[in-house]
Amino acid sequence: MDARRGCLCPMIKPMPALGAYRVTEVRSADGASPAPQDISERFEGRDFTLHELEQRGVRIAGAHVWYLSSGQDWQLKLEPAV
């Protein structure tokens, strides 16, 4: 643990809390396959703040973003909205 920053892994940097983000990709927990269309469509076509994503059930843990649906965890890839 890096005691100076209180972080287990200094390579993982948390996302800034402010601003809008777009979900650009939704994949299985191991990253091997894309999510079914009904799951990925939930995030298409709009920008979200981190708070709005959390209200939709998205878990944000540092650089990792997860969504639980259909009894399975899905990885979300976020990019800052332009």
Image (cartoon, helix red, strand yellow):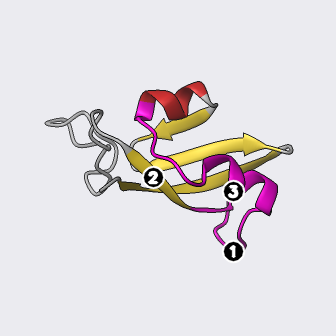
Crowd band around label 1 with a 10 angstrom C-alpha radius: few (<14), some (14–19), many (20+)? few
Whole-percent x and y of residue 15?
A: 32, 44
Place of residue 66 in the rendered image (x, y in percent of width and height, measured from the top left): 59, 45
- What segment is highlighted magenta in the picture? 25-50
Is residue 5 a member of the stretch shown in magenta? no
Dot 2 amino acid type: Arg
Which element type, helix, strand or loop, lies under badge 3? helix
The residue nearer to you, when weighing 18 against 15, is 18
Crowd class of label 3 (few under 14; some 14 to 19; many from 20; radius 10 Å): some
Place of residue 4 in the rendered image (x, y in percent of width and height, measured from the top left): 13, 36
Drawn side of residue 13 relative to residue 49, left or right: left
Q: Label 1, label 3: how many angstroms apart (C-alpha)?
A: 15 Å
- Does residue 33 sit above or below 35 in this rendering? below
For mark 3, what is the residue?
Answer: 40
Amino acid at pointer 3:
Ser
Residue occupied by mark 1: 32
Tell whether 30 sits left or right of 70.
left
Question: Which label was assigned to residue 68?
Answer: none
Q: What is the secondary structure assignment of the residue under circle 2?
A: strand
On the image, which quarter does residue 76 sit in? bottom right
Mark 1: amino acid: Ala
Q: Is residue 29 magenta?
A: yes
| In this picture, residue 31 sits left or right of residue 54 | right
Q: Residue furthest front?
A: 45
Badge 2 is on which residue?
22
N-terminal of the pair, mark 2 or mark 1, is 2
The x and y percentages for residue 58 are: 59, 37
Residue ranking furthest to the right:
70
